């Protein structure tokens, strides 16, 4: 039995840091585990241009603890009015690594998102030309589409068209939750990849709805049926280069989660690697963990893998019930559980 695992330093290819006090509190958790992170732009107001992304990056860097090597990779929030020139200039200047497509009203702070994908075709053309990665929140938002079908429907309505019309555009299908998305990504060209969160590997929709409503298991896209979870586990642990780590860690304070209108998002940053590794261990696929966590993402984003390594070992990690934050508290993913791996160096 493998009891220790040394891998190249991993990256988180999908993450929410927020801003201000919460951002300052959560950055150290991510920087402890990951060398880089793709930082989501859904602040309020959203990060829609180079100047605001550059300023946000500086605020994040100021929150990285002394002596810790961590680089935030910034994204531009696409709107119906995104300026393709500013986006291309921002990428050229090294500010933007990717741009994020949120369908309007799909999730937290997405009211300014894209109302019709056709409206941003000129932006997608510019991104294809400038080789800027497109990150997609793949859910339709129409009221007549059941929330559990929104990802599969997005594939049919939009994903197929985007990859057909922009064959050279690199597209990340973010936080996939269905076997439909796994199949779509597997069948697509090498320019199409997907991130997978720890929660979608661990839970199905029962975890949200059985035994009373469980707000801390609620995120978007919502967890689906067991068959989908099993397809995601297979994809993530298969060694396929198209799937990589993206936590979608999305902090909301406890009062915002335990509310009559609770926010979507799971705060998994503190023990993300331990959570993923538990899954790879259960699937007897520890040998594929480094590819998923540390190699596939850099390869797709065309950035070097890290020289540094991190060592994980079999051993207890006790996840606290709550973590103090911003004068309140937050409930971490796996609250109160014991995980069977820990970071040793
Ligand atoms: O659960 C989620 N929370 N899904 C998202 O897409 C956004 C995120 C957030 O920002 O809270
Ligand atoms: Zn997200």
Image: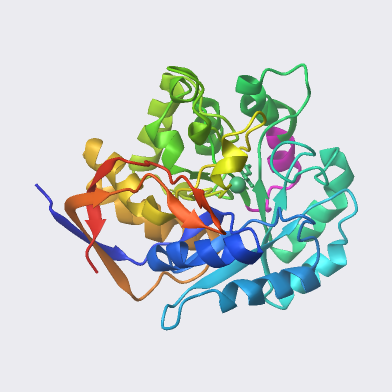
Displayed quadrant of residue 6? bottom left
Name the image colouring.
rainbow
Residue found at x 34% / y 46%: 275
Is 296 left, or right, of 51 in this rendering? left
Residue 306 rendering spot, x and y as whole percentages: 39, 72
Image height of 299 relative to 156, above or below? below
Q: Residue furthest left?
A: 1
Image quadrant holding the C terminus, namely bottom left
Asked whether residue 193 appears in the rendered view, the answer is: no
Q: Residue furthest front?
A: 327
Residue found at x 48% / y 49%: 247
Residue 95 rendering spot, x and y as whole percentages: 69, 73
Is 211 left, or right, of 311 in this rendering? right
For this rendering, which residue is in front, 173 or 333? 333
Residue found at x 39% / y 51%: 272
Can residue 43 be found in the magenta stretch?
A: no
Can residue 169 be found in the magenta stretch?
A: yes
Image height of 212 relative to 93, above or below? above
How many numbered circles does the render carry? 0
For this rendering, which residue is in front, 99 or 259? 259
Is 4 left, or right, of 167 in this rendering? left
Residue 32 rendering spot, x and y as whole percentages: 39, 67
Residue found at x 73% / y 30%: 140
Asked whether residue 224 appears in the rendered view, the answer is: yes
Residue 24 rendering spot, x and y as whole percentages: 56, 67
For this rendering, which residue is in front, 75 or 269? 269
Q: Which residues are drawn in magenta?
A: 159-170
């Amino acid at each position: 039995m493998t009891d220790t695992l040394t891998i190249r330093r991993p990256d988180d290819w999908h993450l929410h840091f927020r801003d201000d006090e919460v951002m300052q509190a959560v950055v150290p958790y991510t920087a402890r585990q990951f060398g880089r992170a793709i930082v989501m732009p859904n602040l309020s107001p959203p990060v829609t241009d180079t100047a605001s992304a550059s300023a946000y990056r500086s605020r994040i860097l100021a929150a990285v603890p002394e002596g810790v090597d961590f680089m935030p990779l910034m994204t531009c929030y696409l709107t119906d009015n995104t300026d393709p020139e500013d986006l291309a200039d921002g990428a050229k200047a090294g500010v933007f690594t990717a741009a994020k497509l949120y369908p309007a009203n799909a999730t937290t702070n997405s009211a300014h998102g894209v109302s019709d994908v056709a409206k941003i075709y000129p932006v997608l053309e510019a991104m294809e030309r400038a080789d800027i990665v497109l990150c997609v929140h793949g859910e339709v938002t129409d009221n007549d589409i059941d929330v559990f079908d929104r990802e599969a429907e997005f594939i049919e309505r939009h994903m197929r068209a985007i990859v057909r019309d922009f064959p050279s555009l690199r597209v990340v299908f973010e936080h996939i939750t269905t076997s439909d998305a796994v199949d779509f990504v597997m069948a697509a060209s090498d320019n199409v990849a997907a991130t997978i969160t720890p929660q979608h590997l661990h839970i199905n929709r029962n975890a949200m709805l059985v035994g009373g409503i469980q707000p801390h298991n609620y995120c978007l896209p919502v967890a689906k049926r067991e068959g989908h979870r099993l397809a995601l586990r297979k994809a993530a642990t298969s060694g396929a280069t198209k799937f990589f780590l993206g936590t979608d860690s999305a902090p909301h304070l406890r009062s915002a989660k335990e509310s009559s209108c609770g926010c979507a998002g799971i705060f998994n940053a503190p023990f993300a690697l331990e959570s993923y590794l538990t899954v790879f261990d259960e699937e007897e696929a520890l040998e594929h963990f480094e590819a998923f966590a540390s190699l596939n993402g850099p390869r797709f984003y065309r950035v070097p893998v890290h020289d540094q390594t991190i060592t994980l070992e079999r051993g207890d990690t006790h996840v606290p019930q709550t973590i103090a934050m911003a004068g309140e508290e937050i409930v971490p993913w796996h609250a109160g559980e014991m995980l069977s791996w820990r970071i040793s160096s």
